[in-house]
Image (cartoon, rainbow, N blue to C red):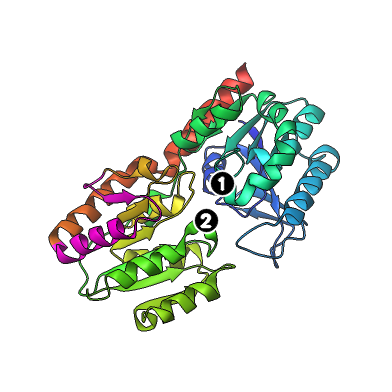
Amino acid sequence: MVRSLFVCSEQIDFKCSLQWVKSGHHVRVVTAKFGDLPAFEKIDGLEVVRLESHRTESFRAKMGAMIGFLTAAIRYCCFECKDFHPDIIHVHFAVPNGPAAMAAAAKMKVPYVITAHLGDIPGTSPEKTKKWFSFIQPFTPPIWKKAARVIAVSEFSKQMALKSYNVPVDVIANGIDYEKIKNPEVLPHETPEIVFAGRFVPQKNLFQVIKTLSEIKDLNWHATLIGDGQDREKIEAAAAAAGLTDRISFPGWKTPEEVIEIFHHADILFMPSRTEGLPVTGIQGMACGLALLLSDAGGNPEIITIGQNGYIHAPDDTEGFAKDFRFLLSEPEKLLKMRRKSLARAAAFDIKNTAAEYLKVFREVINR
């Protein structure tokens, strides 16, 4: 049995941890408290500790909230966590969470493993992190060098990390509960449904969604843009100005189960993001039998075989996106074939595979 302490600053998906618990391992997750979620609970045997970080928004953590979680996590892991003695510590995001893992590992005399995503790597999200990396980057190398292993969620994230840190980096892709969310039957729809799911922030480039859809107003389609965030009012205003109010739905935040249900009744996932690590939403879309129309940012190309299950373009390539929409919406049989290709390809990202890969790394680190 491996006892692992899993540190993450967001209410991220716990499915990998749940897989470890099902395999007989003892796992405690330390994360940020938000809303009315309890400070401690057990979820199918997984222990979840939520620390107060003064986070006020579900779609992002501002600098104050990140610092708040970091200090709370250091305090808890180094001084308050006396009833749990891990064999290994696993931390998501080298910054801001890495210092908590490094301090806890030194205090508990155990190794730690980092999983780097995107925003915690210098140069990957300049619109979000350039300013604060200019201050903190000189202090980050020890976080990476003292880690027993470093994992990246995509080949793109790995290559970007290697530019800044002279440490070995492995790749373990994000996983999904394929058997649970896969679409049992991929069928065509009389009015093709286009979907987006994510935060309404500049990184996700939703203005490109509106620009592209305004170029194909003459075609038969409906779009649902799931999510919320700082740009929502502006996006809705842009849709209205483009005459698309009756053709685009804005349902706001939905539970993960509700998002999957919407995906099951859709045809095309459109995400023209400016930056991505490896998009879980894209992998979920594949498992739901959606053709993918994504930007070429980050790890997006790693889940698409062009012409097989989707297409990629530069984030601002309105003409390219519109051209592919016209092709997909005018060729229903080819669209259906692409959707079925996505469904089959998503099986490689099953969470059981991801959990097994991490456990292999943990055992190698502990045995060493």
Q: Tell me the element at label 1.
A: loop
Q: Quadrant of the C terminus?
A: top right
Q: Residue at x 67, y 24 (%)?
A: 145
One can see residue 157 in this view: yes
Task: Please state the extent of the stretch shown in magenta in the rendering.
Answer: 306-332
Residue at numbered disc 2: 203
Q: Nearer the viewer, residue 133 or 309?
A: 133
Q: Residue at x 42, y 80 (%)?
A: 241
Residue 123's x, y, as percent?
57, 39
Choose top left, top right, bottom left or bottom right for residue 268. Answer: bottom left
Q: Is residue 325 magenta?
A: yes
Q: Amino acid at mark 1?
A: Ser
Q: Is residue 55 above or below residue 158?
A: below
- On the image, the x and y values in percent for residue 319 come to 29, 59
Q: Residues within 10 Å of mark 2 (few under 14, many from 20)?
A: some
Does label 2 or label 1 sit earlier along the sequence? 1
Q: Which mark is residue 125?
A: 1
Residue visible at 29% across and 44% down? 345
| Vertical arrangement, residue 183 with respect to residue 228, above or below | above
Task: Please state which amino acid type lies under the numbered disc 2.
Answer: Gln
